[in-house]
Image (cartoon, rainbow, N blue to C red):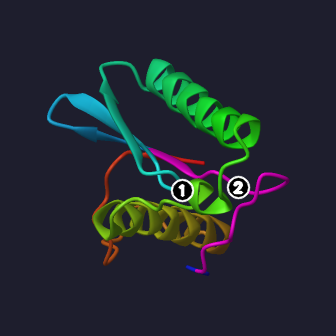
Amino acid sequence: MNKTKIWNTKEKGTFEFFIYPDKGRFVGVCLTLNIIEEDDNPQRLLKSLVEAAKGHLEVVRKDNLGDKLLNRYAPKKYWNKYYNVRLLGEAKKIMQKQGIKDSINLPVKQEWAYAC
């Protein structure tokens, strides 16, 4: 899995979002901008994160601020969770293609999360 982070500019870029359960609530992270929020509802949380990221981008564009403000990455612990969930998803896809049952213990902690 490629862990290279792209450099966002006012003209183009990618924002990465990640939502996971934590102590009965959901934590949402815009990994690219280091925006972290909590909510009881994952769909509402994702909507809030996307709105916050769009608002951030609009201000950077409107005020012609530096592209560095579009590349304020979240702490490593959030990226590690994100990549572990993505890796688990890829492993499950391969297992399904090969006809291997889902109950095999994988070396990655299994938890529900939404990565996009």
- Residue 76 lies, in percent from the top left, at 33, 70
- First in sequence: mark 2 or mark 1? 2
Q: Amino acid at mark 2?
A: Thr
Q: Is residue 38 magenta?
A: no
Residue at 31% from the left image edge and 58% from the top image edge? 110
Residue at 61% across, 55% down: 70
Q: Which residue is most to the right?
A: 11
Q: Secondary structure at mark 1?
A: loop
To which residue does mark 2 refer?
14
Residue placed under numbered mark 1 in the picture: 32
In the image, the segment drawn in magenta is 4-18
Q: Residue at x 82, y 55 (%)?
A: 12
Q: Position of residue 80 (x, y in %)?
A: 36, 69
Q: Secondary structure at mark 2?
A: loop
Residue 31 x/y as whole percent: 48, 54
Q: CA distance from mark 2 to mark 1?
A: 8 Å
Residue placed most toward the observer, 70 or 108: 70
Q: Is residue 103 visible?
A: no
Q: In the picture shown, does residue 21 fall above or below 51?
A: below
Could you tell whether 13 is left or right of 44 in the image?
right
Residue at left offset 14%, top offset 35%:
23
Q: Quadrant of residue 58?
A: top right
